[in-house]
Image: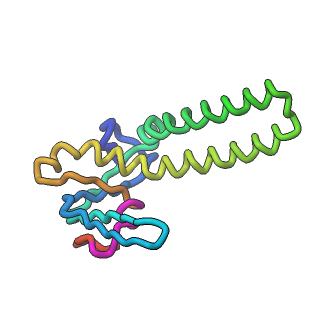
Amino acid sequence: MNCEKCHKETPKGNIYTFYYGKHLDTLVDRWSTLAEVKVTKTYVYHIMGSYSGYICNKCIMKKSIGSFLWFFLIVSFFFAIIITTKIYWSFLPLLCLCVVFGIGYWYMGRKNAGDSILAEIHEERLQGQGANHFFSRSEYAGLKPYTERPYSK
């Protein structure tokens, strides 16, 4: 298939989907208890549609590797502190935990990276049609029920 980002023909990739729409309203609920005043904001959107397209694995890797490198940099900083303070007994379990968490973090970032790449490609065209918010599949699934959703899964 033909990648929408790099426009190269490649069999290794996936079809990704994003949703687009308009922000309609912000609902503010305020209530107070004896201890505090609580305020919640709920954003209401009109979902105008969705778009699916093919993105190759190479483009996904380019997008998601940046977040993984930041994570690796932060973990390396903490390991440098552990090594300089000579707390070697906690080094190995912490390393294993960070590696497992890092792989999971990278995988989840990869999953949403395809949706966001596709949204970036088509953002200008869709903004011309009035869309001002773009949602990945996981963000769309988390929208409140009173958001106008013409598309159901």
- For this orientation, the residue located farthest to the top is 84
Of residues 11 and 21, which is closer to you in this image?
21
Q: Provide residue 151's location: percent of width, then percent of height.
A: 26, 71
77 lies left or right of 123:
right
- For this orientation, the residue located farthest to the right is 89
Q: Residue at x 74, y 28 (%)?
A: 81
In the image, residue 147 above or below residue 101: below
Of residues 27 and 8, which is closer to you in this image?
27
Of residues 18 and 41, which is closer to you in this image?
41
Q: Provide residue 123's location: percent of width, then percent of height.
A: 22, 45
| Total marks in image | 0
121 lies left or right of 40:
left
Residue 141: say if magenta.
yes
In the image, residue 59 above or below residue 104: above
Residue 137: say if magenta.
no
In the image, residue 52 above or below residue 85: below
Of residues 60 and 99, which is closer to you in this image?
99
Q: Residue at x 26, y 70 (%)?
A: 147
Q: Where are the magenta residues, as a range?
A: 138-146
Q: Provide residue 102's location: percent of width, then percent of height.
A: 62, 44
Q: Residue at x 11, y 47 (%)?
A: 128
Q: Quadrant of residue 48?
A: bottom left
